[in-house]
Structures are given as C-alpha cells and as structure tokens.
Image: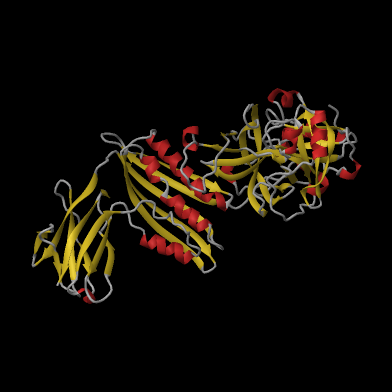
Amino acid sequence: MTRPTSRTRVLASAAVATGLCLGAATAVQAPSQAASGTCDTAYPVSQLTTGQAVTGLTVSSGTTPSGFSGTVLGVLKDGIEPGVDMIMMRLTSTEIDRVGGIWEGMSGSPVYASDGRLIGAVAYGLAYGTTPVAGITPYEDMDQYAGTPPTPLRVGVPSSAARAIARSTDVTTAQAHQGFAELKVPTGISGLSPRVLARDTGRPYLKSHTYVAGRSGSSASPGVGDMISGGNLVATLSTGDVLQGAVGTITSVCNGTVVGFGHPLNFVGKASYGMAGGDAIYIQEDPVNVPFKVANIGDLLGTVDQDRMTGIAGLLGATPPSLPIQSKVTYTPDGGVARSRTGSSDVQLQDAAAATANYELILNHQAVMDAYQPGSETQSWTVTGSSASGPFTFTGGNRYTDGFDLTFASVWDLPDLVWLLSNVDGVTIDSVKVSSNVTDSTATKKIAGLQQRRAGAWHTVTAGAPALVRAGGTLTARVVYAGGTTGRTFTVAVPARAAGMRGQMTVAAAQGFPFEQFPMPKTIGGVKKLVDGAVRNDQATVELSAFGGKTRPVQVHTTTPKDHEVITGHHTFKVKVL
C-alpha cells in the first residue's frame, strides 16, 4: 500500500518513544517528536464519488498499523446526525477477509483518499452482523466535535443505498436495509477471570465485558511514539489492580492531540478518561456476532477529555485525576499462618467506581484466599467525598458468613453504596478504603427463643408465658440461640398509649444488601440516612407491634447489639402491655 511521505516519516521516527508507568501517574513525560503527528487535512465529503478507491490504516497485531483498501459505495446525507453525513465503503485486506469483515476495535481506523487527505474514520458496521461494509465518520466533522443529539443506536439505509451495497458485496438488500450500528469498542478488563466476569448479578453498574484483557509490561508498554494514525487507542476507566479500557483506533494526531473512535464512548461531552496505547494480540473471529480485537492495555500516556458524537479526543502528557480504591484482605486459615495483601485501583471515570470497587474486592479476596471457599469475614470501610453541602466521610462495615463462596457474599454492600453516591447530583467520591479479616469458620447463630429480664431474673417467653411490660416502661430482653447460648441484652421502649394492648415482638435476621434501595436516594442526606440505619448481619431486627386499644396501633423498631457471628432465622413472641 502507498502512503503519503510525511506519514511514512512519522512511522519511522516512532520507535524510540517510551511511555509512562502506571505507578507514577504524577510524573508526566513530555511527548516525543513523533507525538506532533501528521496534522491531517480533511477530504471534503462533497468531493467523494461512487467507486472511488481509498486506503486505510489499522492494527490487527502488535502496535504497528497495516494497510487496507476499499471503495466508496455512497454517502448517507445526515446519516450520523443533522449536518453530519455517513460515508459507506466496502473494505478489504488479508485480515478483514480472513475474519469475514471489519471488527470491534477497528473504530477510528483512518481512511485516506489517493492524494493523502484524510476522508474519515471507520465507525459503523451493518447492523445484521459481520460485514466488510463500513460506515465512515467524516474527518471534517471529527475535527470540530460538533453535535448534541442523542447517540443513534442505528442509522437507517434507504432502499437505493441498500441496493447499491448489495450490488458491490455479498450482503443482501434485506441485510443492508437493516442499517448501520456503531462498531463496539471492546472493553477489556485485566485482573479477573472469565468465571468472575460471566456471573449474572443483576447489578446495573456491572457491564458485560467482551474479553479478559491483559496489561503490557512497563518495559514493553506502548509509548507516545506508538500513538500514531491507525494505531491502537485505549480509553481507560480504571488502572492498577483492575485495569479496564475500551479499545479502538487512532484516526489522527496533531501536536499531541489524539483523535479516534469516530463515534462516542459514553457521549458525555467533556470527559476525563485515561489515554493509553495497546498491544493487539489478534483479531478473534466470531461466526455469530462481530469479530473483535484482543489486546494488552498499556500504561497511561495522557487524558481523553472529549467524548462527542463524532469521536473521542485528548492530549498526550498529563494523566487525569483518579479516585483511589484500596482493599486490604487478611486471611487466617485454620491451623495455618495468616496472610495479607493490600491492593488498589485508580478510577478515572467516577461512573466506573462501583464496578471497580466490586472487582477490586473480588480480586484481592481471590489473591489472598486462592479459592472460592466457605468462611466468615469481618469487614470495615470508609468512603470520603464532597457534595454541594461540603465534604463527607461515611464509615461502616458488616460481618459475612457463607457455606459455599465467602467472596461472593462479601463484595456487594460497599460497591452498592458507591453506586448510590455516584448517582447523587453534585457528589464527587474522593477515596474508598476497605479492610477485611477472613477466617474458615462458618458458624452462625440461629434465633430460637427469647428471655425477658423482669424482677431481677431472666424469664423465658413462651406462648403461655408472654413478655410482660408496663405502658411507658422499658422491655429488657435477650435472644436465645439454637444450642442454648444467649445474645447481648437489648431494650424496647413501650409508649404510654399502648396501655392494655395485646401484641407481639418479632426478632429476625437482618435484611441483606442494605444499600440496594429503589427508588434510590437523590440527596447526600438520603444516603447518610441509609448508612446510619444499616443493620449488620450480626445484629437482629426487633419489631414490637401492639394493638387493641382505643388509639392507633403501636409499632416500635430497634436492633440487637452486634454479636460475634452472623445471625439467622426469625421468631415471633407474645407481649402483654399492662
């Protein structure tokens, strides 16, 4: 393939540049000479003709772009949004032909006219599945970042255009008529197994990931010199233990500004993602869906600060501010020596904080325990941040026991809280810290009975011997667990208006997942109320209900003090108010 001389010189000079290490996000390295880029000139869409030959650049393996070719099939006026056309092309190369068509991760691949001017970026594929037909976002629009309409899920194709596609390809007219859809940018995650990512948890903050990605070693990580037209472009959501990144392609580079993808990532406008290069391993065929690029994700090299309809863009150099999530897990096996690990991840996108917290907890538990196994855990956490009303610090914790997989039982409450906070307007989370102490014990305490403290002695409450309490007084009691052990003393204040009422007191294990609340709280005060009112798994809930008087029924709620094991079961006991 023939490329303009200036672009060839850039590729030749790219080999000497190096990148930044993840562990030194504050140490910014100046872009190399290669980062000045090609500063491409846009080829006007109005000058394109049907059948016009084009060439392009993309990476299917490693970091060096290789060529593809194609022909223009036509132009869909306003196909992307009002004022932004979509160019239809049929593309071919050895790799495109091998996997059956263009792939996820090819988004942003630059396409050139014969005179070297940049026509645009591969960004869309026909909606029906694998196809060599690509929808191209014009570079003259990418360079402006215009547009505010919602991201189109699909771009319709008129009958005449569908017939033109069918004449030039193996695609049928019916398939072409289904329209174009954005090529996905495969989101890879490093540090977790496919077994973990395949779990269906129903959490809205956990997205399906196309594949388990790897991370490039610092010595071999793609550097600034690899950030060239047609090279790999990764927008990172988090780095550290949990490395998450959306993998696409660079369209153009000019004076340290990198433009790519050809369509939005999350369409948020002003953005703050990490910018990294990638080392492609291969293109994975997929006979059912669309082929996709599998890549190792490199070190941070800059910041993606624009996420627009026609692509993403950002600057090489300074990396974005990050939210640190730290997890310490200490495991003391029966008859063994305690082992511990402190892990951390840095989140570039606040909306990814909840998922990253969940993944960090899972990863660190697995690293220390090295198994899915039963056990018990005492967990404590601190979340700091700021809101319109000022800074906040939430602290809390819980105890967990599971007879099958302790890790799965203990990694949801904190991420659920982070998710709630992320959805409150004006809230910024500054840090998340969690500490877990794990043992092999699976012992729990099952509620079996109740004793009342009355006249200086403990009395067992039964159906024939209800708890007795005077209106306006206090009922003092303790739970009796299976096996005969007793819990710590708790009290219930009985309102004076309950005089003469009959009633019952229900003692039950705490409801799980205290921060899974719908509707979700919309203020920081609402979240604080949830945190302050959360009942731990080693506490029981107590509800006293009294009725039968001339006033409205009485309901009083409290909890038992924290115990040393998770409480299970429930029981209801009779109460008589004097």
Give the image quarter of residue 247. Answer: top right
Q: Is residue 479 above or below residue 372?
A: below
Of 25 and 216, nearer the camera is 216
Q: Position of residue 472 (x, y in %)?
A: 20, 75
Q: Is residue 147 above or below residue 404?
A: below
Q: Residue at x 81, y 34 (%)?
A: 163
Query: Taking the image as drawn, is residue 281 in sight?
Result: yes
Q: Position of residue 428 (x, y in %)?
A: 54, 59
Quadrant in the picture for the C terminus: bottom left
Q: Position of residue 123 (x, y in %)?
A: 73, 40
Q: Residue at x 64, y 49 (%)?
A: 266
Q: Is residue 57 above or below residue 514?
A: above
- Looking at the picture, the colour scheme in use is secondary structure
**Left or right of 278: which side holds 121?**
right
Query: Taking the image as drawn, is residue 227 in sight?
Result: no
Quadrant in the picture for the N terminus: top right
Give the image quarter of residue 50. Answer: top right
Q: Residue at x 53, y 61 (%)?
A: 424
Q: How many marks?
A: 0
**Left or right of 239: which side holds 343?**
left
Q: Position of residue 108 (x, y in %)?
A: 73, 40
Of 364 and 476, nearer the camera is 476
